[in-house]
Amino acid sequence: MCEGVPLPALAEVAGTPLHVYSRLELRTRVSALDTAFAAYPHDLHYAIKANSTLAVVREMRAGGAHADVNSGGEIEVALRAGFTPDQIVFTGVGKTHDELVRAVTLGLKAINAESPGEMERIDAIARAHGTTARVAVRVNPDVDAGSHPHISTGHRANKFGMTPTQAHAMVTSMAARDHLKVVGLHVHVGSQITDAEPLRRGASAIADLAIALAAEGIRLEHLDVGGGLGIAYQAAQTVLSADDYAAAVVPVVQATGLRLVLEPGRWVTAPAGVLLTRIVDLKTQADGRWFVIADAGMTDLLRPALYSAWHAIEAVERRDGPPIACDVEGPVCETSDTLGKGRELPPVLVGDLLAVRDTGAYGAVMASNYNRRTVAAEVMVDGSDWRVVRKRQTVDDMLQWDM
Ligand SMILES: Cc1ncc(COP(=O)(O)O)c(C=O)c1O
């Protein structure tokens, strides 16, 4: 079941592969995070990169969140979901001229600048348009996030942000410009973080810098500590609660008196989604274990292939009998195309449904047409109702740009 709706009924009507979201879970999680930080002035800016389906983004807005975007496309998603420019922060390591023009002329709450060169480009655009751009400076605190290297962003070898020393010099030299207003500092040390220390150290790097800048008379408006809070993809995994997270970050920023900005993605949306997939083939391996071949693969959920990520996989309808040892594989012509290796499932047959858990973040957003597979549909469940919130792509949709 997802809320009051049986998953087989969804698969029957909407087909598979199918991303299924629980509206209740989305709302519950965004409000739980907000409550955890209630004692300190803060704004949650939902990281749209985690799941940018309009219906999901609208739920985040309805739950009181603002938006964090990573590209021109995500700026438009945020606007269409109803956010106003002063509710949007814009991060991104390679913002193009057109993206910066759009951000500056909209007057976003903050453009999180990644380099001195980007600050100069923002300044020039703001001057040319006779406006003042609100910028925050992304600091790379040289912290090991302790998560997968592909989703760690705060180490000095990573391409993101500037050292605290560079950031300090830049803010000092640019604070007096007519067309730039430095409103904040930004840090994001990585994603799927399960230990408080890297999050605390990231926050502390920008809090220390804010205090040094205040001593020079440069007063900011906010400290943006990014996202990164991890979830338990495996039941036995130890993770931080929302309260643990607040307890790690709030005392660090408190001394600055500045408003806190958070950019959560995964923690709010991942557990609110499952990927529903049907078994299309079964065969035994040389060692006696099974290959369970599903109709969903890396084009629907890239994380296992991209980061060896682990997602729980369950049979939707349980059959009696001894469990089988298996690898649950996708249909794509790549050995890395897997949903989960080394699993145990109840006995299954071709045509049975599997639910891959915690796919509400970094799932549908990473879809591709590789192998000319069409992109899966997405549905939102609300109590005993549900609706398609993103149509399944057709072959005609997919081929419409080919000349
Ligand atoms: C700048 C920035 N903010 C926020 C996020 C959201 O992170 P998470 O989904 O781990 O909360 C990301 C994702 O990595 C990011 O790059």
Image (cartoon, rainbow, N blue to C red):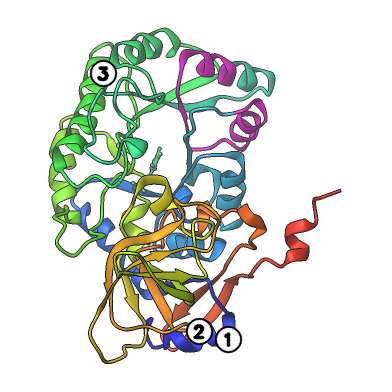
Give the residue at mark 3.
Answer: 214
Q: Residue at x 35, y 61 (%)?
A: 340
Q: Position of residue 60 (x, y in %)?
A: 43, 60
Q: Find out whether the residues at labels 3 and 2 contact each other: C-beta distance under 8 Å.
A: no
Element carrying mark 2: helix
Q: In the image, which residues are magenta?
A: 96-123
Residue 110: say if magenta: yes
For ligand 1, give the image quadrant: top left
Q: Which mark is residue 13?
A: 1
In percent of width and height, residue 341 lies at 32, 60
Camera-near label (3 vs 2) is: 2
In three-dimensional space, the C-alpha distance between marks 1 and 3, rounded to whole angstroms, equals 59 Å
Residue type beneath disc 2? Leu
Position of residue 219 measured from the top left corner of the image (x, y, whole percent): 32, 22
Q: Nearer the viewer, residue 375 or 34?
A: 375
Mark 1 or 3 closer to N-term?
Answer: 1
Residue at 28 percent of width and 57 percent of height: 34
Instruction: Identify which residue, 395 or 239, lies in the foreground.
Output: 395
Q: Are marks 2 and 1 in contact (CB under 8 Å)?
A: yes
* Identity of the residue furthest to the right in this view: 403
Magenta region, main secondary structure: helix
Which of these two is toward me, 223 or 113?
113
Q: Amino acid at mark 1?
A: Val
Cβ atoms under marks 1 and 3 closer than 8 Å: no
